[in-house]
Image: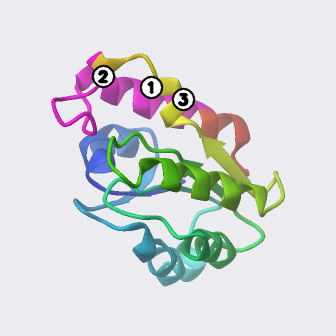
Amino acid sequence: RLIVGDSVTVAVAPWMRSRGFGVHARVSLQFSTAPGIVGGLGSRLPRNVIIALGTNGTVSLSACKRVVRTAGRNRRVFLVTLRVPRSWEAGNLRTLRSCNRSFAKKRVKMINWYGYSAGHPEWFGSDRVHMTASGQRAYRRLIDRVVDSHCLR
């Protein structure tokens, strides 16, 4: 299992690693870099890939489809929805959902952080993007649970 993410993932990286996830996370990472990251791993890419990007700007449908295709047919890609009260939030959510619908259900799964975190302002800091300790616990548990229930063995 590998999670690719931005600063939101950086914050939960130590816990994710302790649960057996590989982590490729960097502050300000853009979704457009995901296909290159995934492709750069080649045969070392695990069977389950979690993409937790979109906080820092627009997600294009072509980049989303490219990351799924780059991962390959024998892998499952999990797309984590985002909560970022910025002008690109609604568009990115639509794009991730559209990308998900473009592939077989066996190949792509959504992790609905946006829906799961609704009604929990206490999970977020003053910027309403980065999480408090309780938000980080909820985020990582959601990802872990969904991936465990749908991962390819």
Residue 77: x and y in percent read 64, 58
Numbered disc 1: secondary structure = helix
- Amino acid carrying label 3: it is Gly
Magenta-drawn segment: 122-145
Q: Could you say where residue 29 lies in the image, as x and y percent from the top left?
A: 30, 65
Mark 1, residue position: 117
Q: Is label 2 in contact with label 1 (beta carbons under 8 Å)?
A: yes
Numbered badge on residue 100: none
Residue carrying label 3: 115
For disc 1, the neighbor class at 10 Å (few under 14, some 14 to 19, many from 20) is some
Q: CA distance from mark 2 to mark 3?
A: 13 Å
Left or right? Give the position of 21 relative to 75.
left
Q: Amino acid at mark 1?
A: Ser
Residue lying furthest left: 126
Q: Which mark is residue 123?
A: 2
**Residue 22: image x %, image y %?**
43, 56
Secondary structure mostly seen in magenta is helix
Mark nearer the viewer, 2 or 3: 3
Other residues around mark 3 within 10 Å, as few (<14) / some (14–19) / many (≥20): few
